[in-house]
Amino acid sequence: MGQRAVSGRIALITGASSGIGAELARAFAAHGHRVALTARRTAALEALAAELAEAGAGPPIVIPCDLSLPGGSEVIAAALAAEGVEVEYLVNNAGYGLFGRALALDRAEQLGIVDVNIRALTDLTLRFAGEIVRHRGGILNVGSIAGFLPGPGMAIYYASKAYVVSFSEALHYELGHAGVRVSALCPGPVPSGFQARAGFSPGFDSAVLQVSARDAARAGYRGLMANKRVVLPGWGVRMIPALLRFAPRWVVLTAAGRLQTRR
């Protein structure tokens, strides 16, 4: 049998079942994009798809998938091919972290952070880059303000987000000539299930830097469409990269370590 003809373009959003991912799906649908939603929780995806069915350019595509497992991107690619659609916008939002000293946390769970936050993000980006270039679309990688800092107490998570920022900035440069937008969305703390899964309670920094998932997602959508290299939602978050330029790295490391130990 021949390959199914391409019938449309979609915005693929990972980690779309809740938090920033769900709000990004709402933002894209509200601006007329047909969305493909992927995450582990089928029921949550289907509920969101039902909500968005009337808002976007077509019925949402639901793809239950665990990106921490090998072959996750193949599952997504096969589902999109079966629907006859190509990726115009890719939103790499899926990710998680764990709180605690690196040597005290479970090794397999920490490697899972690398699998989702780095490997899956990179795999999906490279896998769909040809389609995105063909449609002159965009890539929005959800990083974190943590990507600008070392993170004792969440070492693997902070390091993974540093990768996301660096990779996104490089692609912003490399793909700009092709008319492709690439942005890294780097919020501070966002009220969601992230903190519970990571195993810590929000502290003073959350009160200062916190933005809602909805506001972060809307800033991310606007920033991507404006082709901003890095999107920093909230005045508190925008101050941090500027302040870091004036602080020696050992001071930043010590301050971050003391802040984390108080959680």
Image: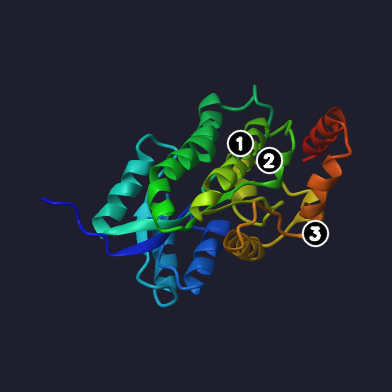
Residue 87: name its quadrant. Answer: bottom left
Say which amino acid is labelled 2: Gly
Image coordinates of residue 104 in percent, x first then y, are: 64, 24
Mark 3–mark 1 Cα distance, whole angstroms, equals 23 Å
Image coordinates of residue 21 in percent, x first then y, are: 53, 57
Q: Tag 1 or tag 3, which sits nearer the N-term?
A: 1
Q: Is residue 157 above or below residue 30?
A: above
Viewed as shown, does residue 5 lie left or right of 31? left
For image coordinates 83% across by 30% down, the residue present is 249
Image coordinates of residue 153 in percent, x first then y, are: 72, 32
Quadrant for the C terminus, please. Answer: top right
State the residue lying farthest toward the front. Answer: 177
* Residue bearing the label numbered 3: 235
Viewed as shown, does residue 34 lie left or right of 187? left
Say which amino acid is labelled 1: Tyr
State the residue lying farthest toward the top. Answer: 103
Residue 253: name its quadrant. Answer: top right
For image coordinates 41% across by 77% down, the residue present is 54
Say which amino acid is labelled 3: Trp
Q: Is residue 106 above or below residue 8?
A: above
What is the count of numbered marks? 3
For image coordinates 83% across by 47% down, the residue present is 242
* Residue bearing the label numbered 1: 163
Q: Residues at badges 3 and 1 in contact (C-beta under 8 Å)?
A: no
For image coordinates 50% across by 67% down, the residue present is 28
Looking at the rendered structure, which numbered label has been put on residue 147? 2
